[in-house]
Image (cartoon, rainbow, N blue to C red):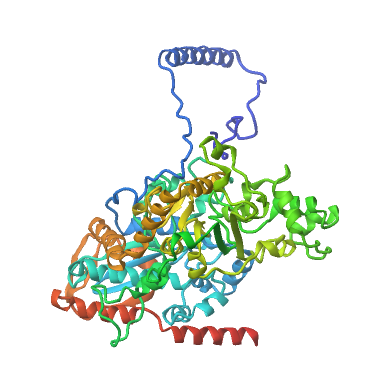
Amino acid sequence: MTDETTPLIPTNERGAGPRTCGAQSEAARKSLRADVIAASAVLFFAGALVVTFPVHKHPHVPMDYYAKTAYPYTHLRLGSYDANDVLRTAREARGFARTPERAERWRADRSAWMADPGDATVFQWKDGEFTMNLVKPTASELGMSEEPVTSDAMIKMWETHDYAGLGAMGGEGKHDRVFKAFSALVVGAMHHAPERFSAGQPPFRVVTHQRDYLAPPCVSNVPKGSRFHPCPAAKAWRAPVFNFGSALKNGDVFPAEVNMPDPEFIDAVLRNQRPAQAETSPLGVTQDGLVQATHASQPTRPWKDRVAVVAWRGADVPHAPKMPFGADSGVRGEACASLLRAAGSMPEGDVGAYVAGNRSVTPPDRVTSNQLAAWAGSDRFNSRRLTPRWRAVLGSLSQSPEASVSPAAAALGISPASVPRKKRWLDARFTALAPNAPCSSALPDSVVGARMTHDDKSAHKYLLDIGGVGGSGWMGTLSDLATGALVFRVESPTADFYDGELKEGTHYVGVKPDLSDLREKYEWAQANQEEAFAIASAGAKFAKEASASDLWDRYVSRPMAAARAHYDAPGQLGEHGRWEDEGAEELERNLVPIYRYAPQGNIRCDDCEENRAVLGKIMMPDAGRVAQLASAAAAASGA
């Protein structure tokens, strides 16, 4: 590929344009003929070499996002890394949302960037203190002419968990996840290897990520549907990225990504405990939080008393929208325009303007359920840009009341008698529609349904599990399994931290991302009730026996220990027991600590239980204080 800075036509020595063939001396002509002959000879021999030794082109290998090659499907593979690797990885793995509103706010207040951690933070242990740190951005990252600065006021917002205040400053939200990740890593460090985090030990640092899924800026220019590597630069990241969200199954995309527990799991385990409460586990917390989050303690209904319908409820959220395989929430863009034209709900000339966000035109009439179903089954319908959740809802509307066996199921010998007739076999509806999608206000009420309680779900034989923003279910999958229903799990390129232990065909039944085989899988289950019940029972057993302590040890403490062992911290112990870092100066100049925790002295083995119990209580924020700050911020904004 030719560099854009290199002209395709070479210029003359004066740079005045292409070379010309004006009047030349005889000597110049002879020199030119000699150059041509020499060049021809070179080309001849080069051609002969190409014939003799053919050049083999390396074609682009399509990326299989569903290949299970990442941790925890495989062993955790980490390489040696240092402080400079941490700084480089943190900066390349994060992305600030540069909207016009944020850009204006950053220019007005050069510390306002601190309201948004920009996806990546750095967890550090040094000289007896744990810290969670923002990484100071460069002016170019924010599109500013002046360098950004820090402020004590912004740090105070983080320290006091004033998430509403940070949101009012322009942050994208979900700030509490940063603290949950910090809490998890501190507890993991003190639980698994307290001796490695005691006085006199070298420092430790690792990059952390707390959004729904990892989507660095390098993926932003990759077209939807592309199956080539979206971010080749990520292969050079040497520092591990502890991702507390949904992680890709294919380890070749972000080799440094380490799938860590999601915030819902951390919140369920690290709960404030009172002295009068039950006996604590080695983590200093009870496992009641996890049991409550998954409803694992609730009894399940007998299989024979359940309704033979596939049920699903959930919000209309995007599906990893920044990734090549992702899709945005709602019916928007070309799909929205196609629906409005098919339903004839507004003048043709206004459709484009309305879809583009122009609300000065007359809004469309409400689309009926029949019109929506007809559109979904027409040639105008293109489902490529719709999320799996929307496919399920449209499938629920489009199903025929007179259920019949699909050709694929009939080929397997499934009888129509095993399929309920004159009944819905799929009941999928949203609990809330995307508020910013242009077609949301025009959709019929039939696409929305009430939330289903755990008891409501337990009344069904079948549940559909569709991932959320990050593409995976987080604790929702465990909760569905705990109902004792057979879970039809929609395949996704992303996974939860415990997915390596779940087996398709043993704990759940897999469904294609486009849901094209959902009907077939349903009909199979109806015709093979014993096998369906066995899979449902195994899934329920997995969810009910999930141990907070065991999961924490495998997926928090052990990755922490592995990263600790691979971190290279050259230096020596200086005066007053402080470590003198070598080569970490640039990183430390750019770290902005927002959370701190210093254990009381060295943790001895006989003190572990007590100190961990105290740690579990003091790490989590005071819920009342957070609510008070949120109310104050709301009152201030209202004024």
Residue sitting nearer the eye, 61 or 125: 61
State whether residue 164 is above or below residue 338. below
Asked whether, in this view, residue 15 is left or right of residue 333, the answer is: left
Give the x, y percent position of residue 623: 44, 83
Seen in the picture, residue 38 relative to 138 is either above or below; the reply is: above
Is residue 270 or residue 419 the one in the foreground?
419
Q: Extreme front residue here?
A: 417
Specify the quadrant that holds the C terminus: bottom right
Residue at position x 82%, y 54% in the image:
344
In the picture shown, does residue 151 fall above or below 58? Answer: below
Viewer-nearest residue: 194 or 577: 194
On the image, the x and y values in percent for residue 486 come to 45, 55
In this orientation, does residue 134 appear? no
Q: Position of residue 7 (x, y in %)?
A: 59, 34
In this orientation, which residue lies closer to the viewer: 412 or 449? 412
Residue 347's x, y, as percent? 86, 55
Residue sitting at x 56%, y 55%: 321
> Could you tell whether 366 is left or right of 26 in the image?
right
Query: Residue at image x 64%, y 34%?
Result: 16
On the rendered structure, is 638 left or right of 35? right
Quarter of image, res 252? top left
